[in-house]
Amino acid sequence: MGKYHLGEFEEIVLLTVAILQEDAYGIAIIDEIEKRLKRKVSIGSLQTVLRRLEGKDMLSSQLGEATKVRGGKRKRFFKLTSTGKKVLEDTKEQRLGLWDAIPSFVINDP
Amino acid sequence: MKDFQNINPPRLAVWILRKLLRNDLLEEVEGDLEEKFFSVLSKSNKRKAKLNYWKQVLLYMRPFAIKKTKSNYSKYSIMFIYTIKLAFRNFLKHKSSFLINLGGLSTGLACVIMIYLWVNDELQMDKFHKLDKQLHQVLLNHEESGKLNTQPSTQGILADALESEVPEVLMAVEDTDPTWFGDNFSLENDKKNIKAIGKFSGDQYFEMFSFELLHGDASIVLDDKKSVVISESLARKFYQNPEYAIGETLTWNLLQFNDKVKVTGVFKDLPNNSSESFDFIIPFQNFKDLVGDGMNWGNYNAMTYATLREGTDLASLNERLGPFVKKKAEGSNVNVFMRPYSDQHLYNKYENGKLVGGRIFYVRLFSLIALFILGIACINFMNLSTAKASRRLKEVGVKKAIGADRKLLIFQYLGESIMLSLIALVVALLIVILLLPQFNVITGKYLTLSFDPIALLIMFGITLITGLLSGSYPALYLSSFQPTEILRGKLQSKFGELWIRRGLVVFQFSLSVILIVSVLVVHRQIEFAQTTPLGYERDNVILFPKEGKANDNLDLMLSELRNIPGVAYASASNHKVVQKSGFTTGVEWEGKNPEVETRFENVASYYDFIEAMGFEIVNGRSFSREFNNEGNSVLFNETAIAEMGFTNENAVGRTIKVWGNDVTIIGVVKDFQMQSVHDKVSPVLFRFDPTFLPNMVVKMQEGQEKETLARLNKFYEDFNPGYAFQFEFMDVEYQSLYQAEEKVAYLSKYFAILAILISCLGLFGLTSFTAERRSKEIGIRKILGSGNWRILVLLSTDFTKMVVSAIVIGLPISYFLVRQWLDEFALRIELQFWFFAVAGIAALAIAWLTVGIQTVKVSKINPVDQLRNE
């Protein structure tokens, strides 16, 4: 079992970064979350989580090339690290394990 | 995407973001926000986009993202906050020394601020004229007996000549000195007759001097000969409202002369920083008519002012101006030169043609006193802080041990002293506001505390310097210790520390001794000057202007006056005796050296004048009614007789020439002190001349002055209807000669008291500290059998030594200083031993008293209490 327990929002962010692959930067992540989960996220709260995850070594980041969009300001792209992947997988397994432990009639019962 | 080039994110929000966000986050976040902004913008409108941007920025203000303020500033800013905190704690912990320091520094600063206000006012005197830089006064150097005698009075025709012949002179204006006419000038209309200070001035007067005209045009007000320009307050006296004055007719009276003139202008009452003082001006042309033939190169009957072309080199101009009059008039002995007009107030004393100072002496003196007082207060601070150093040694040690470097410690102690001096500044300002009215009464000024940028700058400057100065020694001293040595408990007292503290106390008390001696001597000299016999009787003598019917019939007036009970003598003269008024060089005698001009004070008088004044006749007689024709009789004083090479015995009966006429010397008057005791006795000529006698003199019998004055007043109303009986006592007039000195004496007394007080405060603080530090020693001594008296002696010996050495240093310096001051006086007190003895003993007594209060308290303490807390 991993030492670290992901928070709900952390998990979403990690997953979104994984979905976006090479294109995971601030606004793209927010747009993706909004699109998929219909959930409003402020840049501030996203950055908080990104930094925290980077600090836990689950994400790595690097600055991209400057582009004309965004007034020439560079984007910071995030990538899942192997720790990140591992934590995600652990989390998934925990969840699945929990799901499996639920007697089927509890959920299926109308 | 639409084109949104003109729309940008809200600038304030961006600015906030940039200010607060961590640098490493900024680029990325700003980019994100901008992208978001434009995406919102493209979906909805500008307002929403902006609102959203704001929202995002505000939501971004999270702990992780915000700049670490502290880490980004220098350690000094943290130190700064701690300095303030520590300083306040220290103030609270050591209340007595804090109060002593605060009291000393704030009185010191208050003195400095008041003196600064005074000095500033003095320096600004007469500087308000728009043409100030170009404005000059013409002075004459008279060659007399091989020396130069500098006088401001010039020929009335000099101004015109200068203006037309000297290219650098743009304008030249003649003017008369209002004091020449005394109280004899008045203006009247059909309703009122008002005595006022008047003068005659050239027609460009108001163009040259920036006295503000309320009504009338500066360039033409004096053009018409029959015009007068009056002051606002004079206009109010005549017409209630100055506006009504213009075009009205007034009559001026000066002795037997009078004329009708029209009011062409009203000037605003003269500002306080003008050394001129007058109520009305009449065109100079009128004065020319009065003087008639007297307007020539041999008569000095006007002041002359000139404006020079900008950039004129005064020195080279003066070189060329020198012989200006000599070229015009054969045999003239005067050299012309100019000085800046605004110098007249401060630099007006000439000796042998050379500027030797004047009022500037007092300006410098008081500036020096201000510095001394502040210095004493600073020394207190230094002394107490170094003395307290041992209390704070541990603090320094700990700080150093955990990494504070020397700079930080210096910063801390300087910060502490600067803070103290800022608090002192506030207290000082309060003191100044409280005392300024009183100070104005003493100095006769209208000073106000203004907070214009320059004044503020100077005040804060002084405060900052005070803080730095008083904090510098403790700061450098405390911070220099080695932490290990401090913490190991070494360094309890160092030789250097003691030595410097002693030195400072000695310095303070030397200053106090000097001040005590100065105050004593100044006081005695002024008292002496006011009471010393001058060779004439000035008690019960009144002076009043000759006016009205007295001008028509002097003999009648005098005989009526004599008939009034209580009147001893009544006479008239051109001279007030307490002041010099006019001189002549027109005396010639047998054997006179034609190369040398001798100046005789010219006293024109009537019968009984010599008796009324109480002049003593050494030989011969005075003017008498028994002789019909006294017009050719003259008297001289002893100095004049000696100057002419005669003796008191052989002079009487001799014939000499005055202004070319043969006259006979009928008597010799004993020398008397004319003017103040500053001046040496000069030769005096008494003439009998009924034509120009503007002053009436009455000597009253002693013992019934009040009744006599009442009778005189009654008589005057009957005899001279329409004129008010306005008289002055001669002794009061005489005393007013010493106004400047009296003010100095008064002020120096207060400043001396202050200086001594501040010194005592310092000594008090120092003693209480010593007593506290030696309390264990005292306890042990007492237990071993030492009496209270022994302890008292033990504690005061040190201070006594310091004060005695201060006296030894201070007395010679003070002797030298007062010696110099007294040299200004022709008649002066002898410096006596007891002045110095008193000063020394006083200093010692004050010191003992200060030390005594503290030591007696300590010596009485129960030794058990002192030793128990271990």
Image: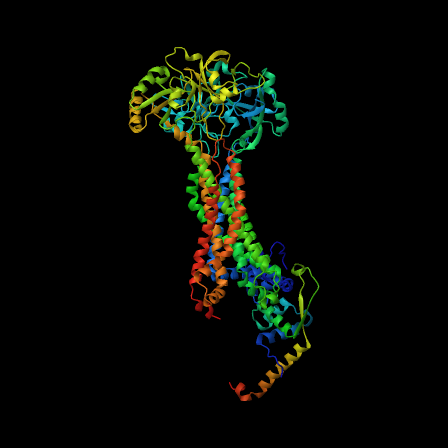
- Does B413 sit left or right of B855 as displayed? right
Residue B195 or residue B756, whichever sits in front: B756
User: Residue B478: image x %, image y %?
Assistant: 58, 60
User: Residue B829: image x %, image y %?
Assistant: 47, 35
Instruction: From this view, report whether residue B815 is shown above or below residue A76.
Output: above
User: Residue B657: image x %, image y %?
Assistant: 50, 13
Residue B236 or residue B68, whichever sits in front: B236
Q: Quadrant of residue B252?
A: top left
Instruction: From this view, report whether residue B407 is shown above or below residue B645.
Output: below
Please give the name of the residue rendered at 38% of the width and 21% of the height, measured from the top-left corner.
Answer: B611
User: Residue B147: image x %, image y %?
Assistant: 58, 24
- Does B403 sit left or right of B363 as displayed? right
Q: Quadrant of residue B627?
A: top left
Please give the name of the residue rendered at 51% of the width and 52% of the height, measured from the top-left corner.
Answer: B422
* Residue B31 visible within the image: yes
Q: How many marks?
A: 0
Which quadrant does the N terminus of chain B fall into?
A: bottom right
- Does B709 sit left or right of B283 as displayed? left
Taking the view exactly as shown, the residue that stands out farthest to the right is A65
Residue B717 or residue A91, whichever sits in front: B717
Residue B387 or residue B627, whichever sits in front: B627
* Residue B114 visible within the image: no
